[in-house]
Image (cartoon, rainbow, N blue to C red):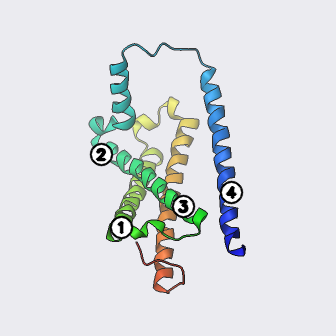
Amino acid sequence: MMNYIPNIVFAVVLVLGIGFFVRNIRKIVRNIKLGKPVNATDNKARRWKNMIRIALGQQKMVVRPLAGLMHIIVYLGFIIINIEVLEIVTDGVFGTHRIFSSLGAAYDLLIGAFEMLALLVIIAVIVFWLRRNIIRVRRFIKPEMKGWPRNDANIILYVEAVLMLLFLTMNGTDLQLQQLGAAHYVQAG
């Protein structure tokens, strides 16, 4: 029974976190519903095309190719973190370590690619931060970009950098523990 206490604590904290997330999503949905109803049934094809072009396709890729490429790298960084979180949560609930390491060489290749991409994300975040705060690109110093828009962008950059640094630190620590022969560490990554 004592062996399962960390897993139970992890599961309880996970459920509390999910509950907090759901509560906040409900608040957002409630606030959105406060707006006036809009007829969004016209021009469905154009609306879908616009959404895909702007949200998923990162329209900046066409207008500003370098900024667009860096946005894609940062976006992929969020995907990496979510894949890693899936593994961390699975390991936390079941008391395993590197549960996906059974994928063998493919897992090692993925982790290596994720680490390279994490490094690229950190570089992109630094460039974005410099452009916003030091170089002061003209479109970032307009009046509408002051206050919350500026702070919001900087917070996102800080959080993304911290997430990538934590990911790299976690993998570096894991490698050290593997090399020291720690009992439950799988040779992976």
| Eye-nearest disc, 2 or 1 | 1
| Mark 1, secondary structure of its residue | helix
Residue 133: image location, x then y, percent: 48, 47
Can you identify the residue that label 1 sits on? 112
Which corner quadrant holds the N terminus?
bottom right
Alpha carbon distance from label 4 to label 1: 30 Å
The residue located at (66%, 52%) in the rendering is 15
Which quadrant would residue 92 be assigned to in this image?
bottom right
Residue 74: image location, x then y, percent: 41, 50
Residue 83: image location, x then y, percent: 45, 56
Crowding around mark 1 (Cα neighbors within 10 Å: few <14, some 14 to 19, many 20+) is: some
| Eye-nearest disc, 4 or 2 | 4
| Residue, far front | 1
The label on residue 13 is: 4
Can you identify the residue that label 3 sits on? 90
Q: Tell me which label, 2 or 1, sits earlier in the chain.
A: 2
Q: Tell me which label, 3 or 4, sits earlier in the chain.
A: 4
Pick whichever, 183 or 155, lies toward us. 183
Crowding around mark 4 (Cα neighbors within 10 Å: few <14, some 14 to 19, many 20+) is: few
